[in-house]
Image: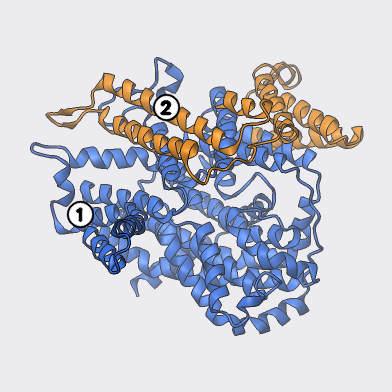
Amino acid sequence: MERKQSQGGFARGLSYSVVDAITAAVVIIIGIVMMVDNQRIGITWAVDGPESGYFPYHVGLILCISGAAVLLKALFGKQRNREIFVTWDRFRLVLLVLLPTAVYVLLIQFAGIYVASALFIGAFMRLLGKISWLKTILVSVGVNVLLFWMFEIQFMVPLPKGPLEAALFGY
Amino acid sequence: MEELNALFHGFSTVLSWYNIGMMFIGLVLGVIIGVLPGLGGPNGVAILLPLTFTMPPTSAIIMLSCIYWGSLFAGAITSILFNIPGETSSVATTFDGYPLAQQGKAGNALTASFTGSFFGALSGVVLITFLAPLVSKFALRFGPPEFFAVFLLTFCSFVGTDKKTPFKTIISMMLGFGLAAIGMDTVSGGLRMTFGWSELLRGIDFLVVVIGLFGIGEILVSMEEGLKFEGKSGRINLRVVLQTWREMPRYWMTLIRSTVVGCWMGVTPGGATAASFMGYGLAQRFSRNGSKFGTGEIEGVIAPETAAHASGTSALLPMLALGIPGSATAAVLLGGLMIWGLQPGPLLFVEQKEFVWGLIASMYLGNFVGLIIVLSTVPLFAAILRIPFAIVAPIIIVVCAIGAYSVHNAMLDVWFMLLFGAIGYVLKKLSYPLAPMILALVLGDRMEDAFRQSMLGPGTGLHVFWSNSLVGTITTLALLMLFWPLIPFTLRCLRRMAGGRRNGGDHGKTKARTAE
């Protein structure tokens, strides 16, 4: 779904109804995938009641039907919304959050959640908010110290840790 | 009077230092969550749920339900002071709340809305206290077919009450059912829709979906709108409070009307948002000052807030009595019940007396304490909104990521959260309702179990759902709800077919009635 959404920004002209239609098409595809996969494990009536694919198969079927209804309405309906789904300027703002978040999630795997969070909050404040260095460091480190205290010490919920924590506290 | 005894017993459970402390934490966190954009009732509860795994269930539910009350109260703060609804259920509050704030009467508006909320919530709790035990006692007679029929009724009424986009409601619901079916099948033990991916074996947790859809999705939507908060100051002093309270009895009719609407919409899963709009609309139609609505009428603040809070509270009635939540947040709370090892359903009132009555007692106390907290600390919470979005947004994202991770200690869940965030952004912009998806996701497995259990044995088929009068009535009612929007449609079609004939309208009406 992410891919379709970025197209919406680049093409500039994608209206609500077109995005609506694409989403409906994706829904139909999901429905078909569900139907095919559950057909494999059995959708008929066994001796002891319906087989395990019965329920999801029909869920997929209803998805296809309603998806088709939304698709038709989006393509041929009378009250189509022809406004642009999202303008490039605004979509840039969305990407400014989405992409750094993706980088952040990737970073968690290498640096642990605390270091990654500190860097993420710091970068976000500094680059997008143009907030002074002092405040940036205070907030990003402070939030993480608080989180560390709450999760690791207070509630004893272990979160992913990286090389820094290993070096400092031996976690 | 059995209920009152049980209730007093519940109070004795709640009145321990630990539980009162949890209540305070829950309320304050709830107000903060409600004020912040991108955090709302459902995902605030979802993020904090993993922290409660080790707590005693009663304390855990007290804290989490108080988060819910807090966030409901907080919706009014942002609507009135900033003209931004912090929760979708307080959209209608902005219509008259913000004009009042512009006239410098923010204090009155806030007091009125909080008091109205309190009144609505209190009525909801009273309803739960006396009605829920009866409903659950009645539901003890239910077998799997009856339960499936009730589930069906819940979901069908979602579709039926949605006049604008019934197909989108169905899609959202079915996506929820589909997600719930991923992983191990509980009846046969076989794998479904894992596509050979072993990580999908345990399925996709509803908490991750909630955090993604409501947390990240909301942040993306509010980022796009380019948040600039220009708030009015919201000082409340005792004089303003007393002055407003003196005015309140004048609006008793609005209060009662909104409460009834709210309770009804909460018990049947219409949702707090619909309730608040209905409450506002009815008040506008019936009030003497109806024409002045939208320019800053106290009544226009009371009506939606009372309805929203009444509906939010009574959404817990079907959750406690039947195990069927009436709102997205209630669905998350219900998921919590299952995680703490409690079996939701009518037996809850029999087997977990302390838990149920502790929760109900905490609702009385929590709403009262909540009212005092919000009345006394509004400026503090309003100040949170003045923090630049560039600071708030990354912190919320970090908290969401931690919340998603700690559900199963799995990194994959954080990626799923991100994916559902993007999906939530698109779906929200295309006005897909998200609450049905969460409800379907939480209830999916139980609904399927109920279906398959009713199909056990020889000679079964769909006719099981009409095998006795009870299940037959519920099933028929469910189908009626599902096709409710079609009735006026067929009516119109028939009328058009009748063409120039004079009695066309009557003809159509009788046809529709026979269809019913």
Disc 1 to disc 2, C-alpha distance: 33 Å
Q: Which residue is mark 1?
A: B471
Q: Which chain is orange?
A: A
Dot 1, crowdedness within 10 Å: few (<14), some or many (≥20)? many
Instruction: Please identify the quarter of the rendering in which residue A56 is found.
Output: top left
Instruction: Please identify the quarter of the rendering in which residue A17 is found.
Output: top right
Where is B260 relative to B275, above or below? below
Viewer-nearest residue: B211 or A27:
A27
Q: Tell me, what colour scheme is on the image?
A: by chain
Q: Residue at x 58, y 38 (%)?
A: A16
User: What number is the disc on residue A128?
Assistant: none
Viewer-nearest residue: B94 or A145:
B94
Q: Chain of mark 2?
A: A
User: What number is the disc on residue A30?
Assistant: 2
Residue B338: in sight, yes or no? no
For label 2, the SS is helix
Q: Which chain is blue?
A: B
Instruction: Tell which tag, 1 or 2, sits nearer the viewer.
Output: 2
Measured as percent of width and height from the top left, residue A119 is found at 78, 26
Q: Chain of mark 1?
A: B
Q: Amino acid at mark 1?
A: Val
Measured as percent of width and height from the top left, residue B209 is found at 51, 35
Residue A132: in sight, yes or no? yes
Both on one chain, marks 1 and 2? no
Where is B159 relative to A86, above or below? below
Where is B413 relative to B238, above or below? above
Q: Quadrant of the N terminus of chain A?
A: top right
Measured as percent of width and height from the top left, residue B261 is found at 47, 68
Dot 2, crowdedness within 10 Å: few (<14), some or many (≥20)? some
Q: Amino acid at mark 2?
A: Ile
Q: Residue at x 66, y 55 (%)?
A: B85
Viewer-nearest residue: A78 or B463:
A78
